[in-house]
């Protein structure tokens, strides 16, 4: 994957191969592993999947998802119906705590409320992402931070040491200040990157993550 065109062509091939993505109106650009996705897709899950498919390609360091969701007429829901559907999905999800709410404006969902863990916030996003009529999801959920985290960086580092996706000689470092975890170092793939970030979000008391990881490809 040494050439710019090789990465672009590989991403295009992966998008075409992925059965969850309609790549007809997706245009791929690449500059030294920084991949941009432009064009349109017919649903929000396809918007997410297009980025995930691009991240699977060797040599891709960053994905800039500029795709626009253009819904088919049959998939359109007015704001009131979509808001109701989204709040029902949140209520029925056992991981999402009470108090998290959704509001729809022109197919764009805004999530608000308070949770204790990043995993609960992610669960809220996932609960509504696949609903018919969603064009985008804006996550404004706050993570509560009542107590100082105890040895958060140590617990995250131990979680990374246990992870099957993080190599034994990893140079990833974890530092915590004021509930914000800073991640530095190098990872080989997006799967390894996501494993590191996921482990950090699992820790109690984390309110945000400063992701400075570099993907070597």
Image (cartoon, helix red, strand yellow):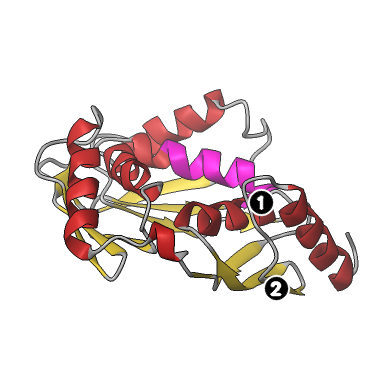
Residue 67 visible in image: yes
**Residue drawn at 38 percent across, 51 percent down:** 132
Q: Is residue 43 above or below residue 94?
A: below
**Residue 149 screen position, x and y as percent:** 22, 39
The crowd level at tag 1 (other Cα within 10 Å; few <14, some 14-19, many 20+) is: some
Q: Quadrant of residue 111?
A: bottom left
* 161 is higher (above) or lower (below) than 138: above
Task: Give x and y (percent) for residue 73.
Answer: 42, 65
Residue at screen point 78% across, 62% down: 12
Residue 67 is inside the magenta segment: no
Label for residue 27? 2
C-alpha span from label 1 to label 2 = 14 Å
SS at badge 1:
helix
**Could you say which is closer to the camera, residue 64 or residue 14?**
14
Please state which of residues 116 and 89 is positioned toward the viewer in this rendering: 89
Apparent side of residue 92 relative to residue 21 in the rendered image (left or right): left
x and y percent of residue 14 in the render?
76, 52
Q: Is residue 1 left or right of residue 125?
A: right
**Quadrant in which residue 38 is drawn:** bottom right
Q: Secondary structure at mark 2?
A: strand
Q: Quadrant of the N terminus?
A: bottom right
- Give the percent coordinates (x, y) of residue 194: 54, 44
Residue beneath the point at 28% across and 71% down: 106
Residue receiving disc 1: 53
Q: Name the disc covering residue 177, or none.
A: none
Would you say residue 144 is visible in this rendering? no
The structure residue drawn at horizontal position 66% and vertical position 30%, both measured from the top left corner, is 168
Start and end of the magenta stretch?
Answer: 186-199
Question: Outermost residue toward the front?
Answer: 74
Which label's residue is closer to the chain start, 1 or 2? 2
Q: Are marks 1 and 2 in contact (CB under 8 Å)?
A: no
């Amino acid at each position: 994957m040494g050439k710019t065109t090789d990465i672009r062509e590989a991403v295009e091939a992966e998008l075409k191969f992925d059965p969850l993505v309609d790549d007809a109106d997706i245009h791929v650009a690449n500059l030294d592993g920084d991949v941009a996705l432009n064009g349109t897709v017919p649903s929000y899950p396809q918007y997410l999947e297009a980025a995930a498919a691009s991240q699977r390609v060797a040599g891709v360091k960053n994905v800039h998802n500029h795709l626009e969701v253009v819904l088919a007429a049959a998939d359109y829901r007015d704001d009131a119906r979509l808001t109701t559907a989204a709040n029902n999905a949140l209520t029925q999800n056992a991981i999402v705590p009470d108090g998290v709410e959704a509001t729809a404006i022109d197919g764009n969902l805004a999530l608000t409320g308070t949770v204790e863990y990043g995993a609960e916030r992610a669960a809220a996003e996932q609960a509504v992402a696949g609903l018919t009529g969603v064009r985008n999801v804006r996550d404004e959920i706050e993570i509560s931070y009542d107590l100082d985290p105890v040895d958060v960086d140590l617990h995250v580092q131990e979680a990374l040491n246990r992870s099957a996706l993080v190599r034994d000689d990893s140079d990833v470092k974890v530092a915590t200040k004021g509930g914000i975890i800073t991640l530095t170092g190098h990872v080989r793939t997006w799967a390894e990157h996501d494993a590191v970030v996921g482990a950090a979000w699992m820790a109690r008391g984390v309110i945000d993550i400063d992701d400075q990881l570099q993907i070597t490809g």
